């Protein structure tokens, strides 16, 4: 009986060792998993380090430089140079390294954790959102399971009053194209287009809606297009001591938000007006006229 118990215990030890060193242990949730539990445990520990390093990069990068060198693949001179860049520069280095590893679940989970950190610091909040956006841009085609959790986080970021955070979130939502496009995302972007009187946000929302490919966005896009001026007004009111006129309209740069809307509508409606790559302003304005004429003839189809 004693020999039987010893043999059974040895078998159990062998099985556990095999499980830890050489066998897959579960199905990936978002991206990939390493082949063994021990590798997975190592990734989890490293991913937790990335979250801490992003949150307080100067403190963490100073603490254990051997760990920093291992995880970020840097030498001591590189680390000193990064520390001299301050928190924002150091955070960029940490974020870039984390994104490069986010094809494994522990690191993608760290990306999501970073993207949800709340901070009153605008730069921090923008960088945290951008980590998720960069991850989506890099991996969304290969790992579609990252779309749904990313969507939830980015939609919540649209409520942020800071335009830089909101801008990054909108750009990220544009990477969530499906067939069909997610309607909650389309509706959220259209709301930004209609309700936020900021041309940077309009530019981002137009680009994202064009990428999503949902034709229901054409009507709100064209309605916004018609409210925007063709040019960025760079003229200034001359003061009493100056007689210099403002810049004439023909020399003023095009309104980028309006151009982005035109590109998006062209893509969604399949008009082939080819705004992309145009060099001369007159060529853009001629295509604006064609777009206006098309809308006058077809707007009833998009009610």
Image (spheres, rainbow, N blue to C red):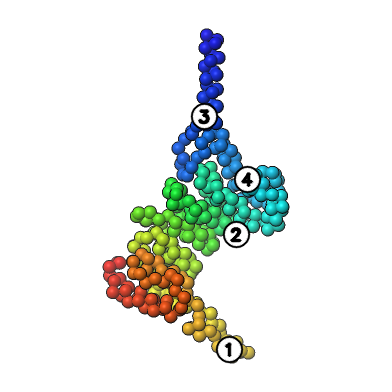
Callout 1 environment at 10 Å: few (<14), some (14 to 19), or many (20+)?
A: few
Q: Nearer the viewer, residue 59 or 90?
A: 90
Q: Earlier in the sequence, mark 1 or mark 3?
A: 3
- Please report contact status of discs 1 and 3: CB closer than 8 Å, yes or no: no
Above or below: residue 31 compared with residue 299: above
| Residue for point 48% across, 55% down | 137
Q: Which residue is mark 4?
A: 71
Camera-side mark, 2 or 3 = 3
What SS does tag 4 mark? helix
Q: Which quadrant of the structure image shows residue 192?
A: bottom left
Camera-side mark, 1 or 3 = 3
Callout 4 environment at 10 Å: few (<14), some (14 to 19), or many (20+)?
A: some
Q: Nearer the viewer, residue 156 or 167?
A: 167
Q: Earlier in the sequence, mark 2 or mark 1?
A: 2
The answer to whether 22 appears left or right of 79 in the picture is left
x and y percent of residue 110 in the render?
55, 46
What SS does tag 2 mark? helix
Q: Nearer the viewer, residue 19 or 215?
A: 19
| Residue for point 63% across, 48% down | 72
Camera-side mark, 1 or 4 = 4
Q: Which residue is mark 1?
A: 244
Q: Which residue is mark 2?
A: 123
Above or below: residue 284 compared with residue 140: below
Q: Estimate the spatial distance between the alpha carbons at disc 2 and disc 3, rounded to whole Å.
A: 44 Å
Q: Estimate the spatial distance between the alpha carbons at disc 1 and disc 3, rounded to whole Å.
A: 79 Å
């Amino acid at each position: 009986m004693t020999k039987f118990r010893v043999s059974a215990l040895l078998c159990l030890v062998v099985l556990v060792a095999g499980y830890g060193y050489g066998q897959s242990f579960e199905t990936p949730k978002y991206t990939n998993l390493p082949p063994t539990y021990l590798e997975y445990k190592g990734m989890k520990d490293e991913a937790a380090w990335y979250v801490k390093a992003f949150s307080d990069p100067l403190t963490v990068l100073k603490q254990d430089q051997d760990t920093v060198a291992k995880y970020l693949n840097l030498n001591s001179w590189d680390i000193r140079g990064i520390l001299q860049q301050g928190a924002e520069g150091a955070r960029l280095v940490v974020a870039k390294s984390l994104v490069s590893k986010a094809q494994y679940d522990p690191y993608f989970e760290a990306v999501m954790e970073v993207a949800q950190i709340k901070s009153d610091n605008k730069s921090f909040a923008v960088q945290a959102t951008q980590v998720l956006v960069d991850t989506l841009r890099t991996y969304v085609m290969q790992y579609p399971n990252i779309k749904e959790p990313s969507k939830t986080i980015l939609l919540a970021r649209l409520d942020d009053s800071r335009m830089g955070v909101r801008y990054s979130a909108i750009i990220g939502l544009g990477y969530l194209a499906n067939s069909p496009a997610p309607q909650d995302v389309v509706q959220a972007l259209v709301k930004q287009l209609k309700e936020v009187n900021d041309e940077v946000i309009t530019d981002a929302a137009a680009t994202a809606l064009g990428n999503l490919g949902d034709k229901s966005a054409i009507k709100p896009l064209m309605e916004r297009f018609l409210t925007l001026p063709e040019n960025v007004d760079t003229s200034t009111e001359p003061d009493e001591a100056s007689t210099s006129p403002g810049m004439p309209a023909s020399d003023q740069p095009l309104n980028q938000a309006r151009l982005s809307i035109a590109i998006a509508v062209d893509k969604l409606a399949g008009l082939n007006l080819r705004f992309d790559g145009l060099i001369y302003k007159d060529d853009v304005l001629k295509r604006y006229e064609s777009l206006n004429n098309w809308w006058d003839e077809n707007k009833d189809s998009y009610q």
